[in-house]
Image (cartoon, rainbow, N blue to C red):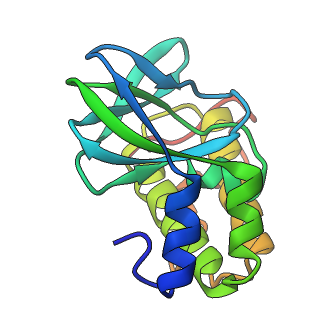
Amino acid sequence: KLFEFLDEPGRQRMMDLAQRQVFPAGTRVVAEGEPGDSFFVILRGSVKVSVDDFGQEKQVATLGPGSFFGEIAVITAQPRSASVTAAAELELLRFDKVPVLDVLKAYPRVKELLAKMGVRRSEDTLEKMMDLGQERVLGIEAGLNLLHRRHSLEKPRWWPPARWAPSPRSSRNSMPCG
């Protein structure tokens, strides 16, 4: 599904870039905070997506065959926003950043769609993490604002949620939880 917006030559160029990789269950494929030099498409198996919650790992998603991950870091040149671990034996296609961005120069619409999917995924993660402290939320919010600015995306109507705004009585380190 990821490549359905490419024409046949574009799909072929992307598949020529793909590197097949296999990971045993429990293997960390990417780590939150590391540079994003590639993105992945799951062929077989599943992964757990997790984020650091003040030193504790919090699972925010499970992805299976046909899903992809790592695109946000590739498109924005920002560090990885989550860790991804093989939940079962995993077979992936890996696409390295530089050649992918070269191909996407000819397909700006596909790059825009990838960015929108990444923003949507980040927003979903953000909603799941509303119980985090304000500094974590502000960091995620800053990342989403960067994605919106870089890709001229329209912000959702609920952006930013009023409940994140500190009250005049609250300090920078406190956040209302709902």
Q: Where is residue 99 in the image (x, y as percent from the top left)?
A: 73, 57
Residue 157 appearing in the image:
yes
Q: Position of residue 68 (x, y in %)?
A: 41, 53
Residue drawn at (31%, 35%), measured in percent from left and top? 91
Q: Quadrant of residue 139?
A: top right
Residue 167 appearing in the image:
no
From the viewer's perspective, tell me whether residue 73 is left or right of residue 18. Answer: right
Residue drawn at (37%, 46%), measured in percent from left and top? 128
- Can you say whether 120 is above or below 92 in the image? below
Q: Position of residue 76 (x, y in %)?
A: 75, 56
From the viewer's perspective, tell me whether residue 72 is left or right of residue 50. Answer: right
- Can you say whether 86 is above or below 93 in the image? above
Of residues 119 and 94, the one nearer the viewer is 94
Q: Locate the N terminus by quadrant.
A: bottom left
Residue drawn at (45%, 58%), measured in percent from left and top? 121
Q: Where is residue 172 in the image (x, y as percent from the top left)?
A: 75, 35
